[in-house]
Image: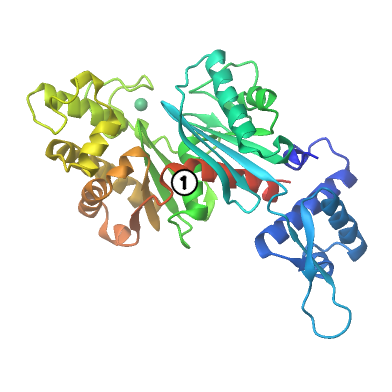
Amino acid sequence: MSLSFLLDSTEDLSLSTLKSIKLKKSLIKLMALNGVATIAELSKETDFSIPTVTKVISELIGEGIVSEDGKAGTPGGRRPSQYGINPKACYYLGVEVKLHSVNIGIQDFNNNFVHFSENVSYTPENTKESLFTLCSIINQFVTDSGVQREKIIGACINLSGRINSRIGFSYSYFFFEEKPLSEIIENQIHIKTFIENDTRAMAYGEYHSGVVKNEKDVIFVNIGWGLGIGIICNGQLYYGKSGYSGEFGHSPVFDNEIICHCGKKGCLETEVSGNALLRKFKKALENGSISILSGKKAIEDITVEDILTAITKNEDTLAIQIIDEIGTELGRFLSMLINIFNPELVILGGALAESGMYLRLPIRTAIHKYSLSLVSLDMELKMSSLGSKAGVTGGCYILRDKLFYST
Ligand SMILES: [Zn+2]
């Protein structure tokens, strides 16, 4: 049976149904986070009576979520049964929509990947046709995965731009006014659907299974085609009032007459982003600079990926020089965030992070130069360890949280 009801709104439920769902969620969470437990232990932890816990556990066994995991090892006397989560009982689906492709994956109940596809060709456009194409890609992936659709407890779709995940509206991509985007997608893929900002999901992926160890105050910097940040405060994702926090790339810091795709002039990402890297690199070639890519490709056909390859594989001087300039500018403006937030950790992720130390070193130097030394000495600067899996992983953890922590 489908368990997505555990993610549904509980507003209209009767008190007894609400209590039963709350207890179910508490038991699932306890076993998922702490491992196997006896009925007595679960009863003590949840403050519900043994008969009530026994009844709900047998329902969860019937639903395939819980299984009996052998007997507890207490010496002497009758040994009580232990119960634990079946990792194959439920799955999470994460989808990250990028400028020219989609990353998509399924994780089991223990947040381990069972399927992952990277860079599936797709270019989002603000039309329903384009949205339905995305839904077809998701449907095909689910079919090919062999995972039963009804066992997928939820889907988290990560998009760039302004996302209000609480009401399910996206305002930068697929904004159709009449219905929340999450509802339109849900009707197409028949899986409970949530939408999330792409950078925020990447930050959460790194937080749970990436480079974050014990840090609780973290800023994740996504340097892709644009520039955004995901903020984690005291171990929680920070959303702001409507979910629009983290639009660092649209800070008006340059007097450069370059129109940003947001419609404003002089945004940080007009000079610090994959888009800026491409523009600066092409301009340098047009002005006569030489690169390993000179003569290999028409200037207009060069891509951000070509430049990143020139940096990482060929140590191309021109490309390194431009990424160095971008890193210095980014470090200067990150100093502002570091002074304000006093984070323990700043993570560099997104496509440009593939350039590794060529990006990290100028950022590090600029942070030392421009931020308050007491504050910058308090923090570490690390590269993302999940790379292209960060967004999908984060989406799956966001779904897990909705199951464990929503009321
Ligand atoms: Zn902008």
Is 249 situated above or below 213? Answer: above
Say what amino acid the circle numbered 1 marks: Ala
Q: Position of residue 56 (x, y in %)?
A: 86, 54
Q: Position of residue 346 (x, y in %)?
A: 37, 52
Is 326 situated above or below 73? Answer: above
Please tell me how crowded label 1 is: few (under 14), some (14-19), or many (20+) other residues with Cα within 10 Å. Answer: many
Left or right: 267 with respect to 35?
Answer: left
Picture quarter containing residue 311? top left
Q: Which residue is mark 1?
A: 203
Look at the numbered disc 1 and give the secondary structure of its residue.
helix
Q: Which residue occupies the extreme left position in the image?
A: 288
Nearer to us in this view, 178 or 309: 309
The residue at the point 19 percent across, 28 percent down is 280
Ligand 1 quarter of the rendering: top left
The residue at the point 68 percent across, 50 percent down is 405
Picture quarter containing residue 282? top left
